[in-house]
Image (cartoon, grey):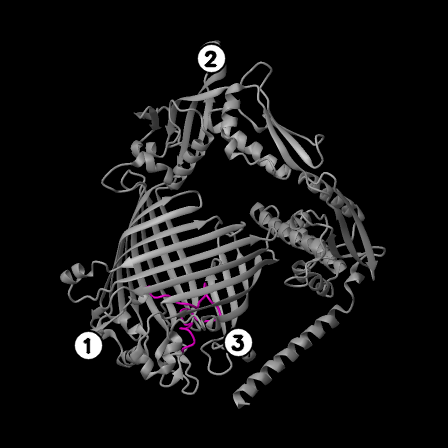
């Protein structure tokens, strides 16, 4: 055994002894079984079992339990609560409460008649009183992290039996039965719910009874879209969804007054065993009356709702039969008219009403908007007038502030250094009268980076860390329509089309070099649905420049050594022109705080440098590379309960040069040819949103390890041409606004093309290339624990991850046996928002 390995193993064994000692101390502090916290004559609900469920949804049935045992995963909350009781004395808390109230009452009496001071003292008294009351009701802070013992209640068990029986009947198990038994052992209760399902009932016939023939025609015409089918199992939940579908169908067809209460469904099970004949009734609003079909007679749009000017009437502009009213028309009516799906002469439609509100909301011009309807009086009492009605639609939109300024201050923790940053953004709404959004942004900050040109330990190869300076700015203009030669705006308006023009500039200064990046993009953005967005960028042009005289000679020598090993970081320090075309499809059904059961899928494709001969003819001193890039990121958010989630993610990326490129390396007048990708277009692994046990962009490639001066280099970014990674994370509440997470990440990057000359020089270089017979052995694995501070408007995140399996580690790759909190083994990630 190597001495270093013996030391690491010994350290791990000492760690486990300490953890075991902590566990014994916790048990000694608790000093009693959890059941001793219970009042006399009461028992602890320990476990619930569900037996006899075969075809029904067992998981749904478990959510109907009126009592649940104390949570044991990921932390035993009853044990924590019990630990907290050893430091809790309700008598002492009540005495302190009374003393505090008496003290503040005296201070308030002394402060009179100063009303300001009295108000401050009263607020402090009430605030402290609430804290003491919370301690009396829920215990101290340790007890509130845990859970009080769940006292078994037979009445709640009977309620659960009733709920389970109702659920089974609602799912077509009409001959089911449920009963419960409980067993008590050492004051711990195990409840067992015994279920007899019986055979489920299925539909054999679906009938309709609809006196109103016009309504009947519309409903029967929609039968192919019905949620009920012959042969399906009876399900009251689906029946409720069908009622909602029919209501929406008729509201979209012009029946403004129609309500779901007009629809009833009756089930008849008397014809044959386990069969149901289902009949749908649609009642008339009153005996002898038909449902009224409404047409929109006129539309008014008030674009400055909420603003009042006494004695001044709003100016009116009529466009496409719509009246636009405002004291001053700051937004051109043509733009607003394109967003209106509620039109004079059309039948009333709930879908068009909601679409109009959504499209006006996406303009970001209004604080809120509503579409209200008013019934117009009948013109006569004829039969036709009794079944037809007219509506006046009024769109009210309250304008948002023209200027909005946002300032952000924060910090990053990278390479062991804290780097402050500041961002200032100014948003200008409607600068040119066309509902445009113009944004200016300035950002500056410092960020820690490893200095690969030096090391602070000749034996370990650990690099120095330095702070880099980053300064940048951008200008962004969003136009609420496509800027194209033709004008199909009426057809495209339902997709919320936008054109975005963006220009940005970034300056980076490091001890080793200075670098600038100027970029301009032209994007078309549209939405297929509320959750699905497309972005097509026909023009993405960036110019990257690193002046050769700004590159440190020692740093340049290290870059050359890495280039000889096959790693193209040196390409990042050439003068480059990167033109490309890209397309993004983004589906995300989650919200900002990720509180939904949702899915996320982002597909991205990019092709660059196809017309590089044209660019090189105009800019002969710039390197232009052609390449293709693709990525797919899928995430699944599974909601376990109101605050617990299971999340998993798979991320795949690939980048490849299309043809060989002739270029000039930095500081050289000799041309070289190779399959070159712009450095920023490579794929990387590691970091706070990737495999968190590795530093950002430092994982891989494959099982090959880059060397500097013969030592493993942990500071160097590791670009790859193929990325495969995944994450699994369980999120759960801890205390108040503090949530926790346990996670495991895996992944790596590989190179796709072989360089035989480098393999001859360094045979280990082949381990950087992807191979089907070994890639699954080269997945790096890291696990850890995280804290999330959820302030609703902002989520701060701290993740601590340690390496479990390192494919690049010399020797035994199961590096978890070397567990420690050093930078080589464990990473600390600070961030804003969830990692994915």
Q: Position of residue 279 (x, y in %)?
A: 62, 28
Q: Which residue is mark 2?
A: 384
Q: Which residues are magenta?
A: 681-704
Quadrant of the image occupied by residue 128: bottom right
- Viewer-side label of 3, 2: 2
At 61% from the left and 79% from the top, the residue drawn is: 15
Assess whether residue 703 is covered by the magenta stretch: yes
Q: Is residue 684 magenta?
A: yes
Element type at mark 1: loop
User: What is the x, y in percent for residue 621?
Assistant: 16, 67
- How far, Cα to Cα, is label 3 from label 2? 82 Å
Crowdedness near tag 1: few (<14), some (14–19) or many (≥20) residues, C-alpha within 10 Å: few
Towards the viewer: 541 or 829: 541
Eye-nearest disc, 1 or 3: 1
Label located before the other in sequence (1 or 3): 1
Q: Is residue 459 above or below residue 248?
A: below
Position above or below: 341 against 661: above
Of labels 2 and 1, earlier in sequence is 2
Where is residue 308 shown, x and y percent of the image? 40, 29
Q: Secondary structure at mark 3?
A: loop
Residue corresponding to mark 3: 821
Upstream in sequence: badge 3 or badge 2? 2
């Amino acid at each position: 055994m190597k001495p270093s390995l013996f030391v690491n193993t010994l350290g791990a064994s000492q760690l486990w002894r300490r953890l075991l000692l902590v566990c014994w101390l916790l048990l000694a502090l608790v000093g009693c079984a959890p059941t001793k916290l219970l009042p006399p004559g009461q028992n602890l609900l320990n476990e619930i079992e569900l037996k006899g469920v075969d075809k029904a949804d067992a998981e749904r049935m478990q959510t109907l339990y009126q009592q649940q045992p104390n949570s044991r995963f990921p932390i035993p909350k009853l044990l924590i609560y019990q630990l907290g009781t050893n430091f809790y004395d309700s008598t002492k808390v009540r005495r302190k409460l009374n003393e505090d109230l008496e003290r503040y009452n005296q201070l308030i009496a002394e402060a009179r008649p100063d009303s300001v001071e009295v108000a401050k003292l009263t607020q402090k008294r009430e605030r402290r009183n609430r804290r003491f009351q919370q301690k009396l009701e829920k215990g101290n802070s340790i007890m509130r992290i845990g859970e009080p013992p769940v006292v078994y209640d037979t009445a709640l068990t009977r309620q659960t039996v009733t709920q389970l029986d109702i659920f089974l009947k609602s799912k077509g198990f009409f001959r089911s039965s449920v009963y419960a038994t409980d067993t008590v052992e050492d004051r711990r209760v195990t409840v067992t719910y015994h279920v007899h399902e019986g055979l489920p009932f299925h539909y054999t016939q679906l009938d309709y009874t609809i006196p109103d023939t016009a309504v009947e025609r519309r409903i029967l015409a929609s039968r192919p879209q019905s949620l009920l089918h012959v042969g399906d199992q009876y399900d009251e939940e689906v029946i409720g969804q069908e009622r909602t579908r029919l209501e929406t169908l008729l509201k979209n067809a012009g029946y403004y007054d129609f309500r779901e209460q007009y629809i009833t469904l009756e089930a008849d099970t008397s014809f044959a065993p386990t069969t149901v004949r289902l009949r749908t009734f649609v009642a008339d609003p009153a005996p002898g009356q038909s449902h009224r079909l409404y047409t929109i007679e006129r539309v008014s749009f008030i674009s400055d709702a909420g603003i009042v000017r006494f004695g001044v009437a709003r100016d009116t502009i009529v466009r496409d039969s719509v009246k636009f009213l405002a004291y001053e028309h700051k937004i051109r009516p043509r733009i607003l008219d394109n967003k209106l799906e509620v039109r004079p002469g059309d039948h009333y439609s709930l879908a068009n009403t909601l679409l109009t509100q959504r499209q006006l909301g996406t303009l970001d011009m209004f604080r809120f908007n509503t579409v209200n309807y008013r019934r117009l009086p009948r013109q006569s009492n004829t039969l036709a007038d009794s079944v037809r009605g007219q509506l006046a639609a009024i769109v009210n939109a309250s304008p948002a502030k023209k200027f909005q300024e946002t300032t952000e201050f924060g910090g990053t923790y990278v390479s062991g250094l804290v780097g402050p940053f500041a961002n200032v953004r100014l948003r200008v709404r409607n600068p040119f009268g066309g509902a445009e959004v113009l944004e200016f942004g300035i950002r500056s900050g410092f960020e820690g980076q490893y200095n690969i040109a030096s090391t602070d330990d000749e034996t370990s190869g650990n690099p120095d860390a330095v702070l880099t300076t980053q300064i940048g700015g951008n200008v962004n203009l969003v136009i609420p329509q496509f800027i194209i030669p033709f004008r199909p705006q009426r057809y495209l308006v339902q997709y919320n089309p936008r054109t975005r023009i963006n220009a940005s500039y970034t300056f980076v200064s490091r001890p080793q070099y200075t670098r600038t990046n100027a970029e301009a993009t032209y994007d078309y953005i549209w939405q297929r649905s509320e959750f699905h967005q497309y972005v097509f960028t026909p023009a993405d042009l960036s110019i990257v420049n690193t002046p050769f005289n700004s590159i440190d000679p020692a740093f340049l020598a290290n870059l050359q050594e890495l280039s000889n090993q096959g790693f193209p970081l040196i390409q990042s320090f050439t003068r480059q022109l990167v033109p490309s075309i890209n397309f993004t499809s983004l589906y995300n059904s989650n919200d900002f705080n990720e509180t939904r059961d949702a899915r996320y899928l982002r597909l991205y494709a990019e092709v660059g440098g196809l017309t590089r001969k044209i660019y090189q003819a105009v800019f002969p001193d710039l390197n232009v590379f052609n390449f293709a890039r693709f990525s797919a990121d899928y995430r699944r958010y599974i909601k376990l309960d109101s605050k617990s989630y299971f999340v998993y993610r798979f991320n795949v990326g690939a980048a490849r040069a299309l043809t060989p490129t002739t270029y000039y390396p930095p500081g050289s007048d000799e041309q070289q040819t190779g399959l070159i990708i712009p450095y920023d277009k490579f794929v990387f692994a590691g970091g706070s949103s990737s495999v968190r046990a590795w530093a950002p962009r430092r994982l891989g490639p494959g099982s090959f390890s880059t060397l500097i001066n013969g030592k493993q280099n942990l500071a160097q970014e590791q670009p790859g041409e193929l990325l495969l990674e995944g994450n699994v994370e369980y999120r759960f509440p801890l205390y108040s606004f503090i949530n926790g997470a346990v996670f495991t990440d895996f992944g790596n990057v590989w190179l796709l093309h072989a360089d035989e000359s480098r393999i001859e020089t360094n045979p280990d270089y082949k381990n950087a290339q992807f191979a089907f017979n070994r890639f699954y052995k080269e997945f790096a694995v890291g696990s850890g624990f995280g804290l999330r501070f959820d302030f609703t408007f902002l989520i701060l995140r701290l993740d601590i991850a340690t390496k479990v399996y390192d494919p690049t580690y010399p020797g035994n790759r199961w590096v978890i046996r070397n567990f420690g909190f050093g930078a080589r083994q464990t990473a600390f990630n600070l961030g804003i928002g969830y990692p994915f």
